[in-house]
Image (cartoon, coloured by chain):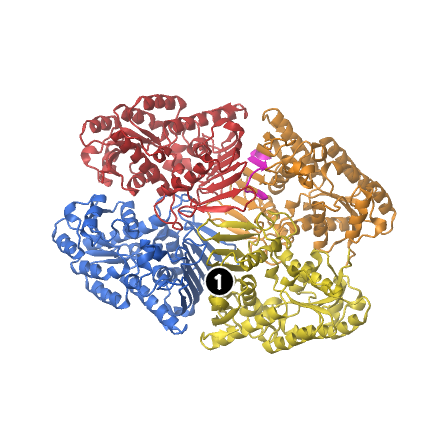
Chain colours: A red, B orange, C yellow, D blue
Amino acid sequence: MRRRLRLGMVGGGQGAFIGGVHRIAARLDDRYELVAGAFSSDAERACASGADLRIDPQRAYADFADMAEREQARPDGIDVVAIVTPNHLHHAPAVTFLRVGINVICDKPLCHTLADAQDLARVAQASQALFAVTYNYTGYPLVRHARAMIEAGELGAIRVVQVEYAQDWLSTALEDSGQKQASWRTDPARSGAGGCIGDIGTHAFNLAEFVTGLRVEALASDLSSFVPSRRVDDNAQMMLRFSQGARGGLWASQVAVGHENTLRLRVHGEKAGLEWMQEQPNVLRITRLGAPPQLITRGGPAAYPQAARATRIPAGHPEGYLEAFAQLYSDFADQIEAHADAVPPDPACLLVPGIEAGLRGMRFIEAALSSSRADGAWRTI
Amino acid sequence: MRRRLRLGMVGGGQGAFIGGVHRIAARLDDRYELVAGAFSSDAERACASGADLRIDPQRAYADFADMAEREQARPDGIDVVAIVTPNHLHHAPAVTFLRVGINVICDKPLCHTLADAQDLARVAQASQALFAVTYNYTGYPLVRHARAMIEAGELGAIRVVQVEYAQDWLSTALEDSGQKQASWRTDPARSGAGGCIGDIGTHAFNLAEFVTGLRVEALASDLSSFVPSRRVDDNAQMMLRFSQGARGGLWASQVAVGHENTLRLRVHGEKAGLEWMQEQPNVLRITRLGAPPQLITRGGPAAYPQAARATRIPAGHPEGYLEAFAQLYSDFADQIEAHADAVPPDPACLLVPGIEAGLRGMRFIEAALSSSRADGAWRTI
Amino acid sequence: MRRRLRLGMVGGGQGAFIGGVHRIAARLDDRYELVAGAFSSDAERACASGADLRIDPQRAYADFADMAEREQARPDGIDVVAIVTPNHLHHAPAVTFLRVGINVICDKPLCHTLADAQDLARVAQASQALFAVTYNYTGYPLVRHARAMIEAGELGAIRVVQVEYAQDWLSTALEDSGQKQASWRTDPARSGAGGCIGDIGTHAFNLAEFVTGLRVEALASDLSSFVPSRRVDDNAQMMLRFSQGARGGLWASQVAVGHENTLRLRVHGEKAGLEWMQEQPNVLRITRLGAPPQLITRGGPAAYPQAARATRIPAGHPEGYLEAFAQLYSDFADQIEAHADAVPPDPACLLVPGIEAGLRGMRFIEAALSSSRADGAWRTI
Amino acid sequence: MRRRLRLGMVGGGQGAFIGGVHRIAARLDDRYELVAGAFSSDAERACASGADLRIDPQRAYADFADMAEREQARPDGIDVVAIVTPNHLHHAPAVTFLRVGINVICDKPLCHTLADAQDLARVAQASQALFAVTYNYTGYPLVRHARAMIEAGELGAIRVVQVEYAQDWLSTALEDSGQKQASWRTDPARSGAGGCIGDIGTHAFNLAEFVTGLRVEALASDLSSFVPSRRVDDNAQMMLRFSQGARGGLWASQVAVGHENTLRLRVHGEKAGLEWMQEQPNVLRITRLGAPPQLITRGGPAAYPQAARATRIPAGHPEGYLEAFAQLYSDFADQIEAHADAVPPDPACLLVPGIEAGLRGMRFIEAALSSSRADGAWRTI
């Protein structure tokens, strides 16, 4: 058995949220071991966080640039770094690690500005190192099944794509209470000019493109900030025009009381339609024209290899968010190992969203902001 | 016990669909008896249809104007007429019956052009007779419960309204097969310039306004005709701006494979959110901010009087589409009786959509068409 | 068009529940007109109830025997009588009307004792008149679809049948409050020795036999009365042994807080399994071994003729309890008309449960009581 | 941060199923590291499996007794061993490790005979080492929430408990195909005399007792083997009598086509009822008498501390089977650490089922077999 990949982390120190998710995801399939980190720019916190995570104190850095340099120099240096900082702190470490040839897993959205994202894309494309962006919902087995069905033509030409991502945790001015997640996610300086559209709208956008294989060519949007003191959008209505003539709607909201994390996708083609919801991820509803709806289950009969591959346990035993997130980590491990061996990777492991997907997410944010400012005029992506 | 109201019908002869629904609706609560009709403009068919319905042959008319005149002259003439013809044949009979003082129940949308609708509205407003338009989903008990909750302020200020009405029965060029319903509903000369937006989009629009008590002030729309030979829209994406600053989205589609009749409404306010689906009409999901979702059931604990009044049987015994439709008939009977007695009607019976709602539906169609032609520019309603 | 059948009613006066349901059911498909009744044994109430129902005062009888005699003598006498009294008052009127040759629709369970039921069965079998018992859940289209599937062998040999009927309306001593329904349904003198098993357990039993085509050959039961002052069972656990070796479980409860009217049936055969719930009656879940579950919808693709025949409106427009109840009335009308014409009836209309089903229901109650008294020893039915 | 606990494993080599689940569960919360194993009694396979799992070859044993002895002797020997062999191979290693003072996590059911289980219980009770049995469904946050609610009296006195565990993977004679899981699980010599009742019935039984805090005092059962060549039961119907007068039903089946892994529990008390299903584990339905049902969500508002503690990520991001399994591992780690420190453990970590629960599971199997042989006579547990 091959050794575990050595993983470093930037961000994710005490009090953070998504860093912990990345760590579970990395651990779940036993392909990584966390050995280094710049968990905080505060030296004391970086050190304490490292200790919490049983990191060798020598490798609990207060500075990511220092970490990149020293890890790159070590014979047992990290193979890959996970960047789990707020959005405005994605670009600098990503560029730094890519430049020293260390593979990067970056949280989404890619950056807090499109300009940063474009710069990062240039660096990534020029680098030998690999890059992944954690649009984690693409890791769900039945999302991959849906994509495979469409790719195989089972839905026929796609006509309509409805996607929505609704939450309610920002229904009040939570950011004014000092809650850490609310605070940076609604701060344009840290999150970017997009609020809800960046935090969850990009997931919806990515999911629609990932599953359908189409591109959103243009959108018209109407953004709102319902909570009075809020500095970014907390609700977005959009109309979408996809390649090949498909049409769609996108709704993202963080003030939709009653929705915890309702990411829902519906795709309707000439021959069939499908529906998937993140809150019940182990079932995919498929209806072929003129036939009764079918419920494809994770691990059940009729699951495609792309779905089966992303499945750990038998049907009827629910897998969830962490397993889907872990799938990206495992697939990326496959990419890294194939790259190291200079062999062609299993195509399935290439489903992990990369720099292009990250960049498109940023263009989506930019287009949504621009359209809304122009009273809903269409903007291309 | 008061006598049953005498009901006449225009349209609804052999081979029709909605006429039969109206007849069941009229019968269900035993407030009406069908005694006359101009079931078809084809004399033979009118006669045969009358016989099928056990109508006195003297009162099975081939011509609605003749019917209006003669029924108005009879001492036992009809109290009310139901107009269940294709859209282009609503205006003339409606105007005719109103002018002779006979109450009118008209199917939706009101007319096939806005001009006709405006003319009808003038006549209706000038007439002593009462007018109802069968936006039948307003008859569901839990729809009324939702409306009452919002009226009582339980959701707080409304922020977001998502409404959708998706079907799949027109996913193919069914109209080319001669299917009667598909044929007239996709024929601009009979249905009006709107296809899907008129047939089902107006229901969604009406439901959103009915439940929220808000008005859609403006919309931006993107209409499509996915089936190649189709002459009207079969899919509509819209963004909505409501009075009092609420925002929303509307999706109507008749090519959404996998949806039979998915009319779904979600309303999110500052204090609570709700969700209702026509396909499971006996449950209403309510979530108050910071509390777990509740399932209000038809006839169950916590149902408002407005819902209880529209309920026939105990909780757990599902009522459906026909009962909701019947509710409009029963409420309209209350209106007619109060009017006849010159007493103030029970406010609850005034929930039946009237000429104003009918006219707004037509303005919605007009705005949707105009916006789409202008590449999604906002249009006021 | 043939004339409506003339319907009389015994019971169902002011304050009753199921009588109103029967009247809607009779009216819904326009095959009956209510023309006579002995709505109450209290003369004043009988008269007032008749007036409420717009019955000719001459035909609002205070005594069912009087009614039977006079109606039988009229040239326009009733064709059929609906008996909707409490259980202890089924036998006498049923026997009386059958003896004068008037067809009978009797509410369930058949009688309040097995002896009465056996006597009634003898009378019914000897009579020219037709007899129906309103095990109304058999009128649901998808229940009939399920039966047809099994009859056609699509499930293969049946192995397991789970059926349950759970309510919570008797979780407290509601009968002590004077509530009319609770009062007689928990009174052995009026309801029979079985409480919950008679009121709803028989529905569950009937549904299981109706759908599977098997017979419950033996049962073991454990009955409880959880509410302290209650005089009849309010919860029943049973194990079932069916013909052809199938096994099953039956749970009936009126103290199951959280259940409004949860009648649920699951049938598992060698080749496929199915699930149906009364609270969501427009969908039937079918799983063929090794294939994903399918959702058969009322009126949707794949519905059998037996289901389509019991359907009034298109798929996606829910039908419910009243429509299912109406189906029994319509089918019985078909039976009566065929009988009158001395032609063979459409086999589909014979699905209405008759005297045999009624009698089996009584045997089920008897067996359940006997088994429970014998500490769960098996009893044959 | 404290060091990870050193974990050994008996069983779980190449081709096994549950061993992999245990390893993920141990890894997920980062409290354990797998350092030793007797993965197979076949030396070559043991060695290969160890290599797959990156185990030091010195610690990949072919014999569990050897492993116990050597690990106990090492300064860095294992703290705990997971026993994941087929049932007939639980007793010997469990006893062996307990006797050398190594803590034991044992898969369920406890043993393949009651005699073995009783012997093991004696050893466990005499040992200083801790013991856990992986009735893993007790690790779900909302299962713990349900238990806490009942413990707090929110349901009032419990009246009815319905529990079922239905699968369909053994609908055919899969064991005859050589499928490894089917093969040993239907072999009395390896699985025990109970088939379905041992494999999944014990889970249902355990869940009912765990959540309600009641004991099943007696049961009556009817077991079947529907698949002709099958040597153990594949379907079980039972009636249950609980302490404090509650009644219930239990259904376990492995031939219920259409059920993947439907473990469902319903508990009805005087004051409220609840329902939970393993296939949708992130929601718990609660109905208080006279109030609308509520949906408690994992991580959502109203979750009890006992549930919140077993939760890793925010509401709306589903957790599943692996997380619930991991919870037992994490809680057991808390027990071990408190034990090592000689401090009282957090009571919450004691929710992990222990030797008593394991023994009761075996008594349940014994009683079910005995009752069924006696034609359903009641048997105490």
> Is residue A67 within the magenta segment?
no
10 Å neighbourhood of mark 1: few (<14), some, or many (≥20)? many
Vertically, is C283 above or below C220? above
Residue C61 in the image: x percent, y percent? Answer: 76, 70
Residue shown at the point (22%, 58%) measured from the top left: D130
Subunit of label 1: C
In depth, the one of B47 and C137 nearer the eye is B47
Taking the image as shown, residue B73 lies to the left or right of residue D18, namely right
Residue A242 can be seen in this image: no
Q: Which portion, as a residue range, is magenta?
A: B241-263
Residue C66, compared with residue C345, is above or below; it is below
Residue drawn at x 56%, y 73% as measured from the top left: C363
Q: Percent position (x, y) of residue C311?
A: 64, 52
Relative image position of residue C55 (x, y in whole percent) = 77, 63
Instruction: Pick whichever, B335 or A28, lies toward us.
Output: A28
> Could you say which is closer to the camera, residue A201 or residue D337?
A201
Q: Which residue is mark 1?
A: C161
**Is A283 displayed left or right of C97 in the figure?**
left
